[in-house]
Image (cartoon, rainbow, N blue to C red):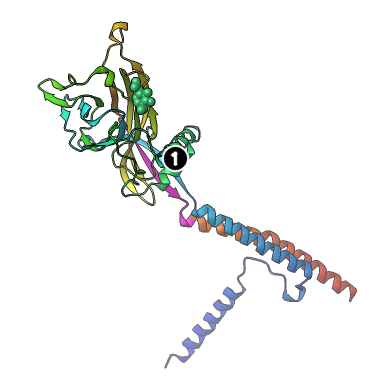
Amino acid sequence: CGEHEGVCAQSRTEAKKALTLVKELDAFPKVPDSYVEATASGGTVSVLAFSVMAVLAFLEFFVYRNTWVSYEYEVDKDFSSKLKINVDITVAMRCQYIGADVLDLAETMVSSDGLTYEPVNFEPSPQQRIWHMTLQHIQERLRVEHSLQDVFFKSAIKGDLPPLPERSSSLNACRIHGHLYVNKVAGNFHITVGKSIPHPRGHAHLAALVSHDAYNFSHRIDHLSFGEALPGIISPLDGTEKIAPDSNHMFQYFITIVPTKLNTYKVSADTHQYSVTERERVINHAAGSHGVSGIFMKYDISSLMVKVTEQHMPLWQFLVRLCGIIGGIFSTTGAELIHTNTHTSTHITYCN
Ligand SMILES: *[C@@H]1O[C@H](CO)[C@@H](O)[C@H](O)[C@H]1NC(C)=O
């Protein structure tokens, strides 16, 4: 302070005054300490209040940790990218007799080089049977319990699909598996008799060498999905098994693909969901039921895109709720505590 001793002392007293003012400033009236006395009942209430607080805070934490899935819809504006088809189908015919390919609406035949033909046994091994039954069971539950889909979305991870159970190799059936890239327009993926050959007006299947009696389009779909294949997500057709009672049989699947943007805490991916209706009939030209026997999957792409986002309570909201619990219990039981205490102390004063 130096030479302005007097001014300095004055400002000091002012500061002291302000400090006492702040000290005395109290929005909450207090019971003077002399009236407050710890009692057994008050202690019990405190212990109870703290336990309730702890339990509620603990439960609140679980609510905070929990996540939910929200859906948003918007017009799909992505028109240039390719659509990936992931296929794994086993047909009860020999590989050299059948061919799989895609024709899209632009009438361009998409090369099906990405597909592998593997001779296998149509009868599944016991392990494979179990796998199939599990898949079919899940599909049934999915149809009834829609919220199960949320669980699948949350459990989706990035990576390769889990390998299917081993199958015994034999020559009576053919497993067609792999990926195809097609234009993002409606199209038709089919498996019919004969390898396809390109043709100026579309394509043709060379079927002359196969006897009609050898046809058997019984099939099992182990996997059929569009876009990025995500382990953990089960497509509607996975686990489908169809037995053809007749050799000339046509199976049709009408698929509507819904582009889906998945954004969860584990994965963010552009994938596709689909809905499917199916039809099958016997091809009998004499009875007026024309067509080509085989497996036909007509797909179309929805113009609406679904955005699936996993969300959870923001931290600030969790803190606000926590404060609500703690403050609420304090104010209710605290008032009760003071009440009992003042009551007791008055009683004591009276006795004296
Ligand atoms: C086709 O193969 C399946 C499985 O091997 C068999 O159950 C079915 O009877 C066969 N159908 C015809 C028409 O041969």
Residue at 45% from the left image edge and 36% from the top image edge: 133
Residue at 18% from the left image edge and 21% from the top image edge: 209
Q: Which quadrant contains ligand 1?
A: top left
Give the image location of residue 129, x and y in percent: 42, 37
The residues colored magenta run: 303-316
Residue at 37% from the left image edge and 32% from the top image edge: 237
Q: Any magenta on residue 268?
A: no
Quarter of the N terminus within the rendering? bottom left
| Residue 35 shown left or right of residue 176 in the figure | right
Furthest toward the front, the residue is 170
> In this view of the protein, which residue sits in the foreground, 145 or 221?
221
Res. 277 in view:
no
**Which residue is disc 1 drawn over?**
130
Q: Amino acid at mark 1?
A: Ile
| Image height of 297 relative to 234, above or below | above
> In this view of the protein, which residue sits in the foreground, 349 or 188?
188
Quarter of the C terminus within the rendering? bottom right
Give the image location of residue 147, x and y in percent: 48, 39
